[in-house]
Amino acid sequence: MSTTLLRQDIISVTIAPGEKLHIRSLATASMSVLSPVREALSRLSKGSLVVQNDHRGFSVAPISADDLLDITRADAG
């Protein structure tokens, strides 16, 4: 799974804020291997879309309506 596809799924709320991101499930759904999924999650955690929880994996960062609006505006411009 690419960073771009995962980011789009988060921004479009296909994956809900607060939802736990299971690496194996994401890899299976995108017909990928685990390493690219881990890399995508790590990159998105630096951009504040994904939260990395120590020893618990990753989840989609909580987001307010204003935050979502800012992100979608940035994507459009």
Image (cartoon, grey):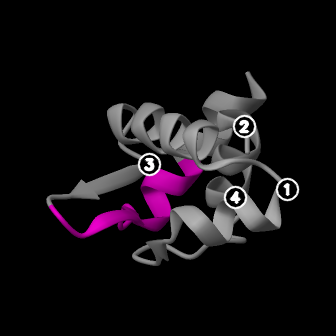
- The alpha-carbon separation of the residues under discs 3 and 4 comes to 18 Å
Residue lying farthest to the left in this orientation? 54
Query: Mark 2 belongs to which amino acid?
Result: Ser
Which disc number belongs to residue 27?
4
- The alpha-carbon separation of the residues under discs 1 and 2 comes to 11 Å
Q: Secondary structure at mark 3?
A: loop
Q: Secondary structure at mark 2?
A: loop
- The alpha-carbon separation of the residues under discs 3 and 1 comes to 22 Å
The residue drawn where x is 64% and y is 54% is: 11
Q: Categorize mark 1 by other alpha carbons within 10 Å: few (<14), some (14-19), many (20+).
A: few
Region in magenta: 55-69
Residue 46 located within the stretch drawn in magenta: no
Q: Secondary structure at mark 4?
A: helix
- Which residue is nearer to you in this view: 54 or 32? 32
Query: Residue 34 in the image: x percent, y percent?
Result: 59, 49
**Which residue was labeled with disc 1?**
31
Pointer 3 or 4: first along the chain: 4
- The alpha-carbon separation of the residues under discs 4 and 1 comes to 6 Å
**Which residue was labeled with disc 2?**
2
Which disc number belongs to residue 77?
none
Q: Categorize mark 3 by other alpha carbons within 10 Å: few (<14), some (14-19), many (20+).
A: many
Q: Are marks 4 and 2 in contact (CB under 8 Å)?
A: no
**Which residue was labeled with disc 3?**
49
Query: Residue 46 in the image: x percent, y percent?
Result: 34, 32
Above or below residue 16? Residue 68 is above
Of labels 1 and 2, the one closer to you: 1
Q: Secondary structure at mark 1?
A: loop
Of labels 3 and 1, the one closer to you: 1
- The alpha-carbon separation of the residues under discs 4 and 2 comes to 10 Å
Query: Mark 4 belongs to which amino acid?
Result: Ala
Pointer 2 or 3: first along the chain: 2
Q: Is residue 37 left or right of residue 19?
A: right
